[in-house]
Image: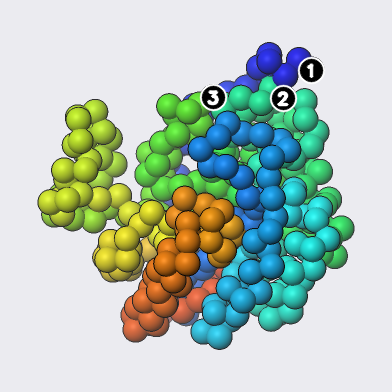
Amino acid sequence: MDQSTPLPGAVPGYRVPPPTAADLIAWPEDFGTRFTIFVDTEEEFDWDAPLDRDSHGLSHVTAIPAAHRRFAERGVPLTYLVDYPIATDPVATDMLREVLADGVSAVGTQLHPWVNPPFDEALTPANSFAGNLPEALEAAKIDALTEAIASAFGAAPRAYRAGRYGIGPATAGLLAARGYALDSSMRSSYRYSDEGGPDFAAVGNHAFRIGAIVELPLTTVFTGLARRGGVGLYNALGKLPKGRGLFARTHLLSRVALTPEEMPLADALEAVAVAVGEGVRVLNFSFHSPSVAPGHTPYVRDAADLAAFHHWWDRILGDLEQRGVAPASLGAIIDAAALPPKRTLR
């Protein structure tokens, strides 16, 4: 297909509907409040340049085992959501098999459509959101990546994330048909509509079902004196010059996702407190694998940034431990989501 011509059938700007009360996961009482960490395990690329199918590297993967040990020493499993360049690179898969020997960490799927065959779409910003592609092409890319992961690791992946959080209206059905159990392609309270991507303004932090799939959004909370205004106030401030910055600096309203990337430690600690206070039962954290080595992401440019990255995790994990929020593996989350809640006899 002509790479300058967008594909027909794309659905840019998918507005994700809110879950119904019946769709919310009723976690077993003895599951408690837990947290999990998903690692977007992907190639290195220039974040400021247009997307490119060929210009990327994988040198950071040699730093993954050392970074993994920092979490393993605290009993924290990681779920590595790997994309096609990672899944098809022998060095990368060897490194990941090494860390998976802890017996509790897991590998899942992350689809970057621009580096994942088949390449039948135009290389455009809108098509970087896999859910915008025609359903047959989205399915073919999921199949190619699923098969690559199963071949590399000896088991079919059970968790999925669309790169750039690019879920579409067909994605959950495609995943269920291929044996996936959990999706984490939604970023609570974020909107990517201006880039042709999905709108998660109506999606909160509580896990829910989409048919047979458990949806576990990346946890994002609003902090500050005006946090009750939530996504509506935040979006309104976005229409005012420097409105969001002013409210953040004066501690009135900040939108904080649970990631060390661009989220200051003090804000993240407050966000954890808010999420726990609001009854979020599974706090979902995330970071990009290239951040474990300097120079590959805007968030970790040098040794000082890397030290700050590790300090962020040390403080956050210590805070979670003090609050009694225990880590949960991917398998534990999937199993707990499938269990009926225990009823208290009256």
144 to 168, vertically: above or below: below
| Residue at image coords 61%, 24% | 124
Q: For residue 322, which quarter of the picture?
A: bottom left
Q: Quadrant of the N terminus?
A: top right
Label 2 element class: loop
- Tell me the residue that label 1 is attached to: 1
Horizontal side, residue 292 vs residue 18: left or right = right
For the residues bearing labels 2 and 1, Cβ distance under 8 angstroms: yes
Q: Residue 105 placed where, x, y %?
A: 65, 73
Distance Cα–Cα, label 2 vs label 1: 7 Å
The reply to whether residue 197 is in sight is yes
Q: Amino acid at mark 3?
A: Pro
Label 1 element class: loop
The reply to whether residue 160 is in sight is no
- Tell me the residue that label 3 is attached to: 12
The residue nearer to you, when weighing 204 against 240, is 240
